[in-house]
């Protein structure tokens, strides 16, 4: 690696580090021990030209501008492993990786696939580039009809924030429908925003588009304000993270829970309804933004354990050190780019772990995961029998709805 | 060099396009407009020229939903002047739009005008050559590369088959852009927001619309599907099987 | 004032374009409605030989050194005079890099209406144009007394515009062509170091659905397994993901392979122009309403990223 020290480069590093200090707990970066834990636990750290610890080193060496010139930072999937294990408690993902990506975006250093996802979000309110009008088309055919708040304008107990992939992605729609059926069976008074719902924007935020995130938050906030509800639940951990941790900073604050927390609370009501046995060894994958970042580990397991016939097994990475599926922080839209670089996918690694744990089913709780894991299953011989299921799908199957 | 980029917004084909009850025009109830892709390239090409050889870039558009955002994004990319034509554009066609742009550009006197070579909803010619004739300027379409010189430019004109003609064009002139030398760059939304605070969109009211030269449509419809493909069903493996069978039958495998 | 149908012949470096013959075929049909002659208009320098197989009632040929290469300046100048003099009922241009450069300008210059993207004419002599990526058709009367039309191929077979009996050629003196502002400096050949997709028996073609440059590798792998090469539609080439030599379509190459496997290609007319004559088109597109399914023999809405690996596997097994 060529290091050119020039009088100009110092100001780039200094300006950047000052911007980091302004972020929440950003000053902790001063206490970095350069121990290398972050770079070691980072799933792609071995490949990055500047893994997290080295970025801090580069800043201290006044060569941060070199970091901005590489594109290996786009290997970061914002899984938060670095932050979770940092002995100095530096919020590395938020204060460093995201901040750096923001700079790269401003400089125009962005892979094309990600560019399309961001432009689509700006234009259509979702990264898939689908028509906003079709956002609740997945509800067609469900009886009783899913409550579209714009149509009925009824006050509800629960506003179900559905999310981009859950709404539009063909594979995810079956999980979304399953959850709608569960809510109906439980007699929950809920409603959805449908076409008034915009992308939560969290992955876009983590990919460096703070401005876009704020615009999405503003649009969602406008929709929320129109209706009466007690709480928000969501099937999307990224939306969960945004609504719980990021939106309140912007003045948009509602009680919010992930659907597994909501259902776990109603376990006594659900148990007798789980009539069908699902005889299988199930490994549960902790999604980064549900588990590691927001500490929800038990409720999903409680739900799975309640299904008759289920034997819960754990994979070698679990709970706090769960392996990212590779979809976060823009990873969902960098798949081709990342594959080109390393010729391997994090989702494949995880699927191998499920196979090693002798699981029949890999249970997930995030809409990025089924498409990613099902893709990975196709390329791994040993996993040909492995099924990927959302917890909602398994519950619905057992409830026979 | 003073470069002007007149742009047009067109129906966004991501949305379902339907015909209105009269059966002669598109239903505008759910119609969303988006920048004409070729005009997006024209803006990018103009900015690239400015970065290469200096100059000033003006972007012009007729008012419509989404136009303001586009103009600000152009400013964020480096455009110096943003102009929005205001008035009633409900009956506009390319002839009328070209005349409206011409009125404005006669005063601005740009050296070079870049605009998209066509738009997917063109029914009465394209804005570029119509504008050129209104201004008495020469026109070269299907341009995918421009080299500036003092009072002229070399335009690379694309023909089918990949053949390219290098044409010396005396300025002032209008070029119809097929593709910019680089794909349109990404602008972070925060940059656009920043620009919204500092850039100004000048408005220029139109006197009226002169649509003569346009086309009258007696019927608009969606094409009948005369003969549809035999759809192959099954898992990807099943389909792969069938396809390989077809390939072998035809002797290509 | 006449009821003749004029067709402006397009030619480049000694070759008459396919579209020219399509226009002549369309003009022949239209002449039955209006009763006039089909007149081919040929501009060039020492190019009268090109009139040899034009299916027209007569050919007007204008020769001038300044017309050696096509420039919109030169053509517009000459055509304006010809149209003013003969007042034909309709003048047909190609909806192409040649025709589109001059038709609109002439519309303004002569105060005549111009109709774009015309695919064919109805039996009553109305124009039928296709717009919005082929999703919408617009039909209407051809305004009188005179109108300009740019035509796209697809409505008529080129063979119908060809004739083994040469039509009578009338040489028309060129007007003064001083003060032209455009001049062709040189032509740049397409890159011949790459594969010639027009010679391939099968093509794996990728469109916007390939999503990004990095996925092209998958298409390459598939082509390798099938023993053919990859071609692409314009959005893929414009983004720089494939070289222009692989471009299929109006602004690229016309291909007629035995099998054209279209992956993630919607089937917009500009692309179909380049591959519509393929013997068998197989379309893979998750959008069941994609126009490509209207011209494909076989189709599937399976996600191409699921199909490609399976196809590579099967192809390898069958060798």
Image (cartoon, coloured by chain):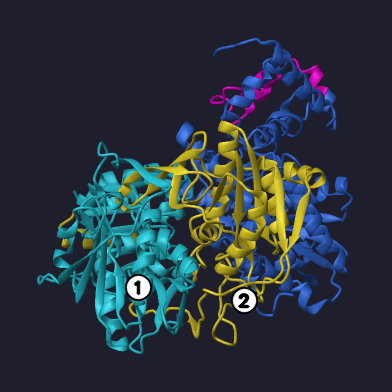
Chain colours: A blue, B yellow, C cyan
Alpha-carbon span between mark 2 and mark 1: 63 Å
Indicate the secondary structure of the residue bearing disc 1: helix
Q: Nearer the viewer, residue A31 or A313?
A: A31
Q: Could you say where residue A391 lies in the image, as x and y percent from the top left?
A: 64, 57
Q: Is residue A279 above or below residue C90?
A: above
The residues colored magenta run A28-56
Which residue in the structure is indicated by mark 1?
Answer: C85
- How busy is the neighbourhood of tag 2: few (under 14 within 10 Å), some, or many (20 plus)? few
Question: Residue B114: which disc?
Answer: none
Question: Label 1 is found on which chain of the structure?
Answer: C
Density class for disc 1 (Cα within 10 Å; few <14, some 14-19, many ≥20) is few
Measuring 55% from the left and 12% from the top, which residue is drawn there?
A2
Residue C208 point in image, percent of width and height: 46, 54
Query: What residue do we see at 41% from left, 79% from top?
Result: C146
Q: Is residue B120 visible?
A: yes
Residue A187 appearing in the image = no
Query: In the depicted view, which residue is nearer to us: C106 or C289?
Result: C106
Residue in the image at 61% along x and 22% along y? A50
Element type at mark 2: loop
Image quadrant where residue B55 sits? top right
Magenta residue check for A301? no
**Along the horizontal axis of the image, is C1 left or right of A233?**
left
Q: Tell whether A128 sits left or right of A345.
A: right
* Residue A41 on the magenta span: yes
Q: Nearer the viewer, residue A89 or A126?
A: A126
- Point out the frontmost of discs 2 and 1: 1
- In percent of width and height, residue A63 lies at 67, 16
Chain to which mark 2 belongs: A
| Residue A93, image quadrant | top right
Q: Is label 2 on the same chain as label 1?
A: no
- What residue did someone put label 2 on? A140
Above or below for A380 versus C164: above
């Amino acid at each position: 690696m060529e290091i050119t020290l020039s009088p100009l480069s110092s100001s780039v590093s200094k300006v950047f580090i000052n911007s980091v200090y302004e972020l929440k707990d950003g000053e902790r970066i001063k206490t970095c021990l350069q121990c290398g834990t972050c770079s070691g636990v980072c799933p792609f750290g071995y490949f990055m030209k500047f893994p997290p610890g080295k970025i801090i080193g580069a800043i201290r060496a006044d060569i941060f501008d070199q970091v901005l010139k590489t594109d290996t930072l786009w290997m970061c999937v914002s899984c938060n492993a670095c932050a979770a294990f940092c002995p100095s408690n530096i919020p590395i993902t938020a204060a460093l990786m995201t901040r750096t990506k923001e700079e790269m975006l401003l400089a125009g250093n962005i892979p094309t696939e990600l560019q399309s996802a961001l432009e689509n979000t700006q234009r259509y309110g979702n990264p898939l580039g689908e028509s906003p009008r079709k956002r609740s088309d997945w509800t067609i055919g469900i009886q009783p009809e899913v409550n579209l708040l714009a149509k009925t304008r009824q006050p509800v107990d629960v506003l179900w924030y559905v999310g981009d992939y859950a709404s539009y992605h063909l594979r995810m729609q079956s999980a979304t429908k399953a959850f709608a059926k569960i809510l109906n069976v439980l007699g929950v008074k809920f409603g959805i925003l449908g076409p008034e719902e915009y992308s939560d924007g969290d992955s876009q935020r983590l990919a460096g588009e703070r401005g876009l995130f704020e615009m999405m938050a503003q649009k969602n906030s406008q929709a929320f304000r129109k209706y009466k509800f007690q709480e928000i639940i969501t099937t999307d951990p990224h939306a969960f993270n945004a609504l719980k941790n990021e939106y309140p900073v912007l003045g948009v604050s509602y009680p919010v829970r992930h659907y597994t927390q909501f259902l776990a609370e109603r376990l006594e009501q659900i148990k007798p309804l789980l009539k069908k046995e699902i005889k299988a060894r199930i490994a549960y994958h902790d999604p980064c933004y549900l588990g590691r970042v927001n500490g929800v580990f038990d409720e999903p397991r409680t739900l799975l354990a309640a299904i008759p016939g289920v034997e819960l097994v754990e994979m070698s990475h679990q709970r706090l050190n769960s392996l990212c599926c590779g979809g976060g922080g823009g990873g969902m839209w960098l798949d081709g780019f990342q594959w080109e670089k390393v010729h391997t996918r994090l989702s494949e690694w995880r699927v191998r772990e499920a196979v090693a744990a002798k699981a029949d089913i890999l249970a997930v709780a995030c809409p990025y995961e089924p498409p990613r894991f099902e893709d990975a299953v196709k390329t791994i011989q040993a996993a040909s029998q492995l099924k990927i299921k959302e917890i909602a799908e398994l519950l619905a199957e057992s409830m026979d709805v | 060099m003073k470069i002007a980029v007149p742009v047009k917004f067109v129906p966004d084909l991501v949305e379902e396009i339907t015909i209105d009850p009269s059966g002669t025009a598109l239903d505008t109830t759910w119609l969303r407009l988006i920048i004409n892709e070729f005009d997006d390239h024209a803006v990018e090409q103009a900015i690239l020229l400015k970065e290469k050889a200096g100059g000033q870039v003006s972007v012009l558009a007729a008012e419509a939903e989404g136009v303001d955002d586009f103009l600000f994004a152009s400013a964020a990319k480096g455009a110096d002047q943003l102009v929005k034509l205001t008035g009633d554009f409900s009956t506009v066609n390319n002839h009328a739009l070209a005349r409206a742009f011409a009125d404005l550009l006669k005063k601005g006197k740009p050296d070079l005008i870049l605009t998209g070579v066509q738009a997917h909803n063109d029914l009465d010619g394209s804005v570029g050559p119509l504008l050129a004739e209104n201004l008495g300027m020469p026109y070269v379409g299907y341009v995918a590369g421009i080299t500036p010189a003092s009072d002229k430019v070399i335009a690379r004109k694309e023909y089918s088959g990949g053949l390219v003609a290098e044409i010396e064009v005396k300025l002032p002139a209008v070029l119809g852009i097929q593709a910019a030398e680089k794909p349109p760059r990404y602008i972070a939304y925060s940059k656009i927001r920043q620009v919204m605070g500092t850039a100004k969109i000048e408005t220029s009211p139109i006197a009226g619309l002169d649509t003569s030269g346009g086309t009258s449509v007696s019927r608009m419809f969606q094409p009948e599907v005369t003969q549809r493909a035999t759809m192959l069903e099954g898992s990807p493996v099943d389909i792969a099987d069938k396809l390989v069978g077809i390939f072998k039958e035809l002797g290509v495998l | 004032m006449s009821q003749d149908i004029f067709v402006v012949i397009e030619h480049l470096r000694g070759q008459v374009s396919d579209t020219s013959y399509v226009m002549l075929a369309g003009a022949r049909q239209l002449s039955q409605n209006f009763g006039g002659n089909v007149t081919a208009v040929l501009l060039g320098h020492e190019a009268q030989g090109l009139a040899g197989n034009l299916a027209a009632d007569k050919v007007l040929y204008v020769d001038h050194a300044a017309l050696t290469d096509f420039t919109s300046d030169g053509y517009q100048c000459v055509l304006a005079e010809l149209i003013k003099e003969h007042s034909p009922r309709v003048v047909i241009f190609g909806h192409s890099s040649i025709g589109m450069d001059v038709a609109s300008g002439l519309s303004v210059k002569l105060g005549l209406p111009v109709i774009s993207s015309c695919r064919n004419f109805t039996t009553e002599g109305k124009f039928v144009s296709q717009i919005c990526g082929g999703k919408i058709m617009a039909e209407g009367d051809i305004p009188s007394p005179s109108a300009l039309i740019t035509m796209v191929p697809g409505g008529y077979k080129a063979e119908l515009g060809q004739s083994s009996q040469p039509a009578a050629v009338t040489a028309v003196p060129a007007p003064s062509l001083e003060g032209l502002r455009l001049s062709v400096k040189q032509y740049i050949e397409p890159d011949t170091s790459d594969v010639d997709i027009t010679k391939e028996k099968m093509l794996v073609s990728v469109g916007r659905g390939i999503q990004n440059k990095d996925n092209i590798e998958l298409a390459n792998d598939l082509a390798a397994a099938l023993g053919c090469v990859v071609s692409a539609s314009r959005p893929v080439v414009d983004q720089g993901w494939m070289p222009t030599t692989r471009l299929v379509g109006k602004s690229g190459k016309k291909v007629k392979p035995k099998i054209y496997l279209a992956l993630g290609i919607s089937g917009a007319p500009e692309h179909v122009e380049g591959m519509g004559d393929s013997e068998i088109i197989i379309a893979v597109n998750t959008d069941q309403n994609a126009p490509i399914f209207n011209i494909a023999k076989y189709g599937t809405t399976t996600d191409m990223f699921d199909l490609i690996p399976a196809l590579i596997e099967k192809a390898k097994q069958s060798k």
